[in-house]
Amino acid sequence: MKLLDVLNLRRISGQIAALVVASIVAINLILTATFLVHRPDQVDPSVDRGHSQLAALVQLLGAAPPAERPRLFADIARAYPQLQIESLPQGTAPGASEPQGLDLRSLRRRLGRGYRILALPQENDARKIAIVLPDGAMISASMMPAPGQRLFWIGPWMVTLMFGAFSVTLLGLWAARALTEPLSSFATAAENFSLNGAAAPLPERGPEEIRSVARALNRMRERITTLIDDRTKMLAAISHDLRTPITRMRLRSEFIEDDAHRSRMLGDLDQMRSMLEAVLSFLRNDRKLESMTLIDIASTLQLVADQFADMGYKVAYDGPEHAMATARPDDLHRSVTNLVENAVRFGAETTIRLAVSPDTATIEIEDDGPGIADARKGVMLEPFVRGDDARNMDEAAGFGLGLSIARSIVLAHGGELSLHDRQPHGLIVRILLPVRQPARQAAA
């Protein structure tokens, strides 16, 4: 990889390099700001522990005449009771020794060489010292307790480190989202890809590599759409051209004197015409979608049941009288009609059931026919696949497109279609439809 490619901010490599540099600069700025605020090069005044006050008072007593010291002791006791400065009779400091474990360097430096510091026995957790004045007089004083050692994880450097790590983490998450968002849009666009032209093309934004992929996918989508359009137009033209000879053959078949032969010929011609219409209907299903609207699913299912009942089939509806949902009314009617046609073809009785929840509408078409083997359930949803021996069609009954058309309509609604066994025998076709459609899909 060339150096210029790494420095090009239009490429992913350049943006990652810029992110690393920005993170390092951010950490250094945070550490510098913390150093300027806390100034570790300066002495912390809290370490003094009152040494400056004690040294000033001791020097005042050392410079004062002995006759003035009792009055000074009284004044100091009132002003600085925490120091507990008292006079000790000379030579009456039992147990006095050189101080061990006490950091008195600051106090010695302030007092100077004319003063001597001794440690007194500890009483009630109070550390007392004896100070010998230049004239030999002795006084006692209480040392302020040393401040507790600051825990490492609450120190300024640990807080700074945590703040820097948090800031860099947020910066990294933001950059990662900015880099991966176009990839997520690719996955969403591929998932919602359809041939009806409703989905918008992929946005060509982001790094140069991602923009190139978006352009390539958009061109591929245009080629696929053009290919499907050409195929549909070709089949539509073939269908249109075949209808004329089929019509002529049908007219000529009317002059056949043998009734049985004429009936078989007319049946074959009707089958050819039905096959052309079914294939074209399947191919055009994804191309022309009606708009979504709020409909009464229960009324649609009742209408389908009544239509088949009027034709002499035993079809019943079981469900609520009214159930509102957003759907394409004609497509839904067509899908359920195809499923009921299959059910009445193989069973004596058919039931259309409806159950509605706040988010999902469940439609079940069940029959008492021979059913479908478990190994064939997945294959039966593919186009041009007929049933097994238990549910086989004759040549004039169908072309294996009823379930495929119904499934494509359900998928266009954002739902699911599945096949299940009915006890003791039969088949249940279950449709799960969302009650509310997304705004983008509803506008398609």
Image (cartoon, helix red, strand yellow):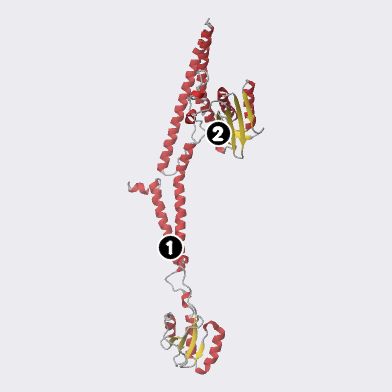
Q: Which amino acid type is marked by label 2?
A: His
- In the rendering, at what x and y percent does residue 327 appear? 59, 33
Q: Quadrant of the C terminus?
A: top right
Q: Which amino acid type is marked by label 1?
A: Leu
User: Does label 1 or label 2 sit earlier along the sequence?
Assistant: 1
Is 387 rendered above or below residue 28? above
- In the rendering, at what x and y percent does residue 17 appear? 38, 51
In which quarter of the view is residue 222 placed? top left
Is 6 rendered above or below residue 44? above
Residue under numbered circle 1: 31
- Dot label at residue 413: 2
For the residue pair 15 and 385, the one nearer the viewer reads as 385
Q: Secondary structure at mark 2?
A: loop
327 left or right, relative to 401: right
Q: Looking at this view, name the residue that lies furthest to the top.
A: 257
- In the rendering, at what x and y percent does residue 192 appear? 50, 36
Task: Tell me the crowding category of disc 2: few under 14, some 14 to 19, or many 20 or more residues within 10 angstroms, Cα based.
Answer: many
The residue sitting at 51% across, 86% down in the picture is 85
